[in-house]
Amino acid sequence: MRGREVFMKSLVAHGVEHIFGNPGTTESPLLDALLDYPSIDYIVHLHEGMAVGAASYYARATGRTGVVSLHVAPGLGNGIGMIYNALKANAPMVVTAGQQDTRMLRRAPILSHDLAAMAAPVTKWSTEVRDADEMDEVMRRAFKVANDPPYGPVFVSLPINVMEQDTANAPIAPGRAFRLPAPDPAAVAEACALLRAASAPVIVVGDEVGRTGAMGDLVRLAERIGAPVWFEGIRGHVSFPSAHPHARAGLPFDAAAIRKTLAGADLVLLVGGAFFEEVWFSPGSPFPEGAKVVQIESSAGPLSFNHAPDVALVAGMGPALSALDAAVAAASDDAWRSAAQARCGRLAEQKAADAAAYQGRLGKAWARTPISMPRVMAELRKATPANALVVEESITASVDFAAAFPFDGADQYLGARGGGIGQGLAGAIGASVGSPGRPVLCVSGDGSAMYSIQALWSAAHHALPVVFVILVNREYRVLKHNLDIYRQRFDAASDKPYPKMDLGGPALGYVEMAAGMGVPGVRVTNPDDVAGAVAQAFAAGGPRLVEIAIEGKR
């Protein structure tokens, strides 16, 4: 058996059905072997970053390991930004790249480099297969490490001559690994005592709750203790129903603003996330003074990493939240339950007030032209099928997006983690591959779309039912917002224009670009036409693009 056969059979043994890749010469053994493994579909991309982005969203949409094939050093370099995003999103992936023949690596042949060293900073494990006899064990370990919490990408370099070497070692099928421990009863008891003593608890939730199917457990606990639920500033999954009376919003991006947002809380429960991803430095803690902190994670890595909680425990999200809820219920008396219910009532009133305020904002913006962000999101929601999977990278439209699209299931939404832009279009490819036949709405800003516009060709090539909505304001709006903040924070002159942040001259034509890659598109400038254009795009049943002109920074 040759190394390439062990590699391919290892994929089959681990249930792999798709490889996301951009082919090259050093990948010839893999590409040639595909003909003998019809159960594995190769999803073709025109840029390595698109392949990684698609595989990451595929892994996040399905819970299965995404497999990527890149091309030597420049190809790996092209994919590293998306590998970083996948690391931050905890997407389980096995990323490979073909390597030149090891017998000439010392002579530095064309396109060669130390691939494992290149990938190491953005992966959980990075290695090169040195001999075909290693292939079975390397592949078994690659899948194991990628799926150990916290999940993430690993990298395997595949030299072309090693893929063609003979070996007597057969591929190793995965065993059944039960990775998540039960919650420690002592830790649950201590956390319960702190919750019982709190008169103003708050919850901050991360992606791990949605990713592990523990949303219902969190809802029960939040209702039990009468706590508002805040989200990470950047989130990739739905971990709490956004229309629930306890659901608040995303937290800001500096410690002082977070502390102000959580002001009045005497206990903060952190559940399953990175939390408090800061953009700007502010001195001090993100927690209100005197507040107790409890943290629950499914692995030890993030536990007490940036902060020192009063109680911290490692366990599966569902079992931990369920055990804590049961402990609180058992310890509660009538007076405590009455106080918790009063908090629930106040949260419902606040939610209703927020909804009314947003309706006022929407009404004021309804007739504006170019189309306002509140209006465009309302129209998108109206035209999107109820069963659609929504991939969103709208960045500065995120507040209006969240108000327009209420999600109550973890399988309804995927957002961009890591902060690197261009994930939306590429991610929609992987999300669609992982959800065969399901309509996918991809919402992206125009600046982000240009980072991964090649994804449109892959959507056409594989006939994927994705509606790409590009919000065109012809600017890097988020950079203008951040420049305003910078000027204020550092007392810089604020009467200057925004340099190099506009995308006009020449104007980018997304409909024309889409047509060149086989995706029909339409341009919309009238707010009354948005819903109809999007509905028609979905009705077509294949990839479509809708370019919508929206207002710029006001």
Image (cartoon, rainbow, N blue to C red):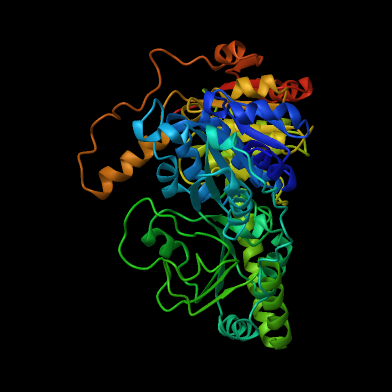
The residue located at (58%, 49%) in the rendering is 134
Quadrant in which residue 106 is drawn: top left
Quadrant in which residue 105 is drawn: top left
Pick whichever, 209 or 446, lies toward us: 209
The residue located at (47%, 72%) in the rendering is 264
The residue located at (56%, 51%) in the rendering is 152
The x, y position of residue 162, in whole percent, is 55, 38
Pick whichever, 7 or 146, lies toward us: 7
The residue located at (43%, 29%) in the rendering is 74
Pick whichever, 184 or 195, lies toward us: 184
Could you tell me if residue 364 is visible in this image?
no
Could you tell me if residue 497 is visible in this image?
yes
Pick whichever, 399 or 296, lies toward us: 296
Work out which quarter of the rendered image holds the N terminus and state it.
Answer: top right
Task: Give the answer, above or below, for where 428 lies relative to 331.
Answer: above
Q: Is residue 361 left or right of residue 243?
A: left
